[in-house]
Image (spheres, rainbow, N blue to C red):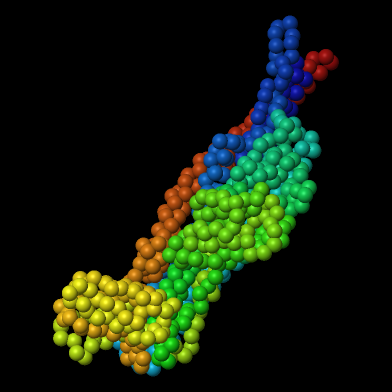
Amino acid sequence: MSGNVLAIGISGLNAARAGLTTTGHNIANVSTDGYTRQSVVFRSALPQYTGSGYFGSGVEVSTVVRQYSTFLESQRLAAETQQGYLDAFQTQAQQIDNVLADPASGLSPALQDFFTGVQDVAANPSSVPSRQSMLSLSEALTSRFNTLDARFEELRKGVNVQIESSVQRINSLAKQIATINQQIASSPGTQETPPNDLLDQRDALVTQLNTIVRVQTSTQSDGSINVLIGSGQSLVVGSEALSLSAGPSHDDPANVSITMPTPAGESELPASLFTGGQLGGLLTFRDHTLDTAQNEFGRVALTLADSFNAQHRLGQDLHGALGQDYFVVPTAQVQARNTNAGDGSISATISDVGALTTSDYRVVYQGGNYTVRRLSDGTESTFSSLPQTLDGITMDLASGTPQDGDSFLIQPTRYAARDIAVGISDTALIAAAAPVRTVAGADNTGNAKMTQGVVTDVSGLPLPSDITFTYDQAANEWVVGGASPAVGPFAYTSGQDISFNGMSFTISGTPADGDVFTVTNNTGGVADNRNALLLAGLQTANTVANGTATYQGAYSQMVSDVGNQTREIQVQSQAQDALVKQTQQAQQSFSGVNLDEEAANLVYYQQAYQASGKVLQIASQLFDLILQLKQ
C-alpha cells in the first residue's frame, strides 16, 4: 500500500510541476504578440482493483491546451481585415480631397481668372494688354489642369508601389505559414496533444496576412491549414505556398495588376478577387475613386477645350481671318491588350463631347462581333461591325484584323487634363469679333432695326458678296438678295429670328416699303466684341454631361463626390475601430494572459506541489515502519 501511495505522490508532484511550468510559460509570454494562454488538462489515473474495490492511482497530465475560440478569432479577423481596408482607402481618398478642395491650388480660382481675362477682352477687344492677359491666364489655367493631373498620376504611382509591396509581403507570409504547416504536420503530437506554440506562431502570421487581404482558412487532418485570400483564391495548401507577382497590367500599363503562375504561364487575376485588407482598399480606391475622379477632371478639361474652340472658330481675329482652335484638344486613348493575338488596331475619336461619361470602355472581339463594355456600370453593347458611336465616342477598326479574344481599352477622358494646352501665342489671333455685320440703308424711312446677328456656321464665310434684305410691304416679307445659295423670302413678324446659311438675325419694329438692311463681311472690325461676349458666356453655359452642368458645376460636383466619399469612409473607419477594439477585448478576455489569474495559479500549484511532497513523506515513513516491523 505504501508503494501505491508513493506513486500517487509522485503523480501529484508531476502534475503540479506541469501546472507550474505552464503557468510560468504563460507569464513569460504575457507580452508576446499572438500568444494564446495555455492550461494543463488533468485526468485521474486508472484505478487499481482490489478485493475491497477500486483504489485511485493518482493523476495523469492529459495534455496542454490553448484557450482558443474559433468563433472569437473569426470575429476578430473579420473586423481587422475591414479596418485595414477602410484605413488604406481613407488615407488615399484624403489626399485627393485635399488636392481638389484646396481653395488656392484647386481648379476653381484658375477657371475664374481665365474667364475674367475673357471678359476683359470683351470689354476692350482692341487692347493688346487685355489680349495678352487673356493668353497668360489661359496658360495658367492649362498649367493648373496639367499640375492637378500630375498629382493624380503621383497618387496612382504611389498606390501601385504599395500594391507591389503588399504582394511581396503576402508571398513572404504565405511561405512562413507553409513552413509552419510542415512543422506541425511532422510534429510528434496528435490532435489531442497539439504543438500549441507552433499554432500560435501560425495564427499570428495569418493575422498579419489578414490585415493585408481578407483570409479564410480550413484545417486538414494532419493539423496544417489551407489559406484562401480575397474571394476564394488559394494561397497556401498544406506545405505549398503560391507565389503571386505584381507588374504592369495587360490592359493598362499605367496600373499594376496581380498575377499567379499557371501551367500556361502567368495569369492576371481580377482586382475584385482581392477583397478586404489594405490591398483590397488600395485596389478599390485606384480602380474606382481615383479612376473616376481623374476621368471626371479630364472631362471638364476636354469639354472646356472643345466648346471654347467651337465658339472661337465662329469669330474673327484682328487680321480679319476666321478664328482657329484656341486650345489643343486632347484625344481619346486606346490601349491594346499586350496579349492580343491579332494585328487589329482600334481607333477612338470623340464625336460629341457633351455626351461623354466618366467611364472607360473595353472592346472585345469575339466571333466576328465587337462587344463594348462600359466599365463604370458593366453595360454592354454588341456590334457586328465598326465604326459605331457610343456615348459620344466613335470607334473604328483602324487597321489589321483582330482575332477572337482580342481586347482594347478606350479611355476617352483619362489623360485630357494632362494633354490640354493653349493653341495660340499671338494676341492678334484671339477671335473677339464676329465675322459679319449688318448695316441699315441710308434711305430707310421706317423704324425697324436689325441685330448684328449670330454666326453658327462659318463654312460659307467670308461672304462672296453682300446680302440684302428688302422689305416688301404688300407681301409683308423680306426679299433676300445676294445669298448663296439663294434663300427667302421671309415672312415678317417683328422680333422673329431669320436664320439661313449658318447665320441668324432678328428684325423688329415697323419697316417702310423698300427699306433695306445689308449683311456684309466685318471688315476692319477690330473693336467688335460680339464673339468675345459669347466666349465669356460659356462660363455659365451648361456644356458638360449632356448640357446639365457648367465647367465649374461639373468640377464642384466632382469635389463634392470625393469629399462625401472621404467623409463617409472616415465615419465607417471610426466605427470599425470601435468594433475592432471590442472583438480584440473579447478575444483577449478568453485567450489572453491575465497576470492576476496566473499569480493565483502559481500559489495553487505551489501548494499542490507541497501537498504531494507531504504524501511522499508519509509514504516513506510508512515504508520505514513496515521494515521495522519485519525486523
Q: Is residue 385 left or right of residue 83?
A: right
Q: In the shown orientation, is residue 164 left or right of residue 116?
A: right
Q: Compare residues 97 and 298 and report the one nearer the observer.
A: 298
Q: Residue reaching furthest top?
A: 51
Rendered residue at 53%/40% (across/down) = 75
Q: Quarter of the image holding residue 512?
A: bottom left
Front one among 457 and 471: 471
Determine the residue located farthest toward the right in the rendered image: 631
Residue 562: x %, y % from top left: 44, 61
Apparent side of residue 566 relative to residue 262 in the rendered image (left or right): left
238 vs 307, nearest the viewer: 307
Image height check: is 137 above or below 178?
below
Q: Is residue 432 above or below residue 344?
A: below
437 shown above or below 77: below
Q: Residue at x 30, y 78 (%)?
A: 480
Residue 359 picture location, percent across and down: 51, 59
